[in-house]
Amino acid sequence: MAPNERQTRRILVALDASPSSLRALQAGAWLAASLDAELAGLFVEDEDLLLAAGLPFTQVLGSFSGDHVSLEVASLEHDFQLIAQKMARAVAQTASQFQLMHSFQVLRGQVNQRLIEAAGEGDVLTLGGSGWSSRFKRMGASAQLAFERGRSSILMLPGGQRTDKDTLTGSRLVAVYDGSPSSDRVLAILLQLLRTRAPQTVMLLLAGSDSEIDTLKGRAQAVLAPAGVDVRYVPLYSATTDDLIGAIQASGARWILSAADQPLIQGASLRLLLGRTGLPALLIR
């Protein structure tokens, strides 16, 4: 194992039966196959919704009738069971397609907290519609909390109806490298992807001078050379978040690969990056 490389144990996909979470399952399976990891599905029964269902005045809008109907605990429990069964089948079928070890788990609790607790070091928590506001391509509550408080790496997929193969698989990558220990782990993950999938890759080198850029390029080439795949290196001098976003957009890539603690993507900058690019982002810890 290369320096700073942590074995990726599981690709943990948050599932809720929505089309976007099923797309996240496909992307997670591709990543699991690429990193020789287990594909793990997770469905969280929303405890807050169950508590609301126990109140006599709680109503929801019927999907087909358009009428307000009472929300009952027994009915909600039944719906949870049906969703869990459907998601378990989807995980098994997807794992079979990619020839992966797989598991499926049902937890009950506050959804965001359960997701954070379930994903530990060595996992990649994969969020589709559960983590995004799909209409506006914003980072949602689950994704934001997992990024700020979680221990795992995160794969965030945008919402909406994009289903093309390039979006669901990392066939064209842009990686961000600044020489920090966490970005060295990005190199380790990228090396695995290059060995197994040989994606077209652009590497953005973040530094303040030509000599620093040359040093970063040399370190990256030394790590990635065993893959035998060409990587295009692009220097970014004293870059701002806007500079980084512009370079990612210009790269033509369809996935972003970065350290989760990269200074240019913290707080509102991460929301800006995800919203303006609309690309999946694999953020490594």
Image (spheres, helix red, strand yellow):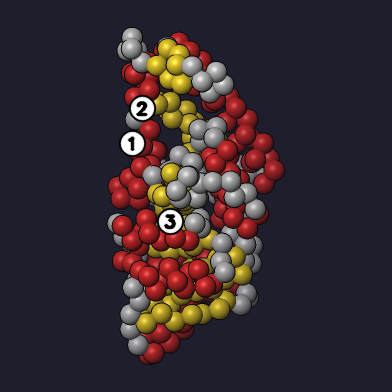
**Front-most of 219 and 27?**
27
Q: Quadrant of the C terminus?
A: bottom left
Q: Characterize the local packing of mark 2: few (<14), some (14-19) or many (20 or more) Cα atoms within 10 angstroms.
A: some
**Front-most of 44 and 225?**
44
**Front-most of 93 and 143?**
143
Question: Dot 1 lies on which element?
Answer: helix
| Mark positioned earlier in the residue sequence (1 or 3) | 1
Question: Which dot marks residue 109?
Answer: 2
Q: Is residue 151 above or below residue 279?
A: above
Q: Characterize the local packing of mark 1: few (<14), some (14-19) or many (20 or more) Cα atoms within 10 angstroms.
A: some
Q: Residue at x 48, y 61 (%)?
A: 277
Q: Are marks 1 and 3 in contact (CB under 8 Å)?
A: no
- Residue underneath mark 1: 113
Question: Dot 2 lies on which element?
Answer: strand
Give the amino acid at mark 3.
Gly
Q: Are marks 2 and 1 in contact (CB under 8 Å)?
A: yes
Residue 14: x percent and y percent?
48, 39
Residue 255: x percent and y percent?
53, 61
Relative placement, left or right, of 150 versus 34 is left
Give the amino acid at mark 2.
Gly
Question: Dot 3 lies on which element?
Answer: helix
Question: Which dot marks residue 121?
Answer: none
Q: Is residue 33 visible?
A: no
Give the amino acid at mark 1.
Gln
Q: Is residue 65 above or below residue 102?
A: above
Eye-nearest disc, 3 or 2: 3
Question: Which dot marks residue 275?
Answer: 3
Relative placement, left or right, of 119 versus 25 is left
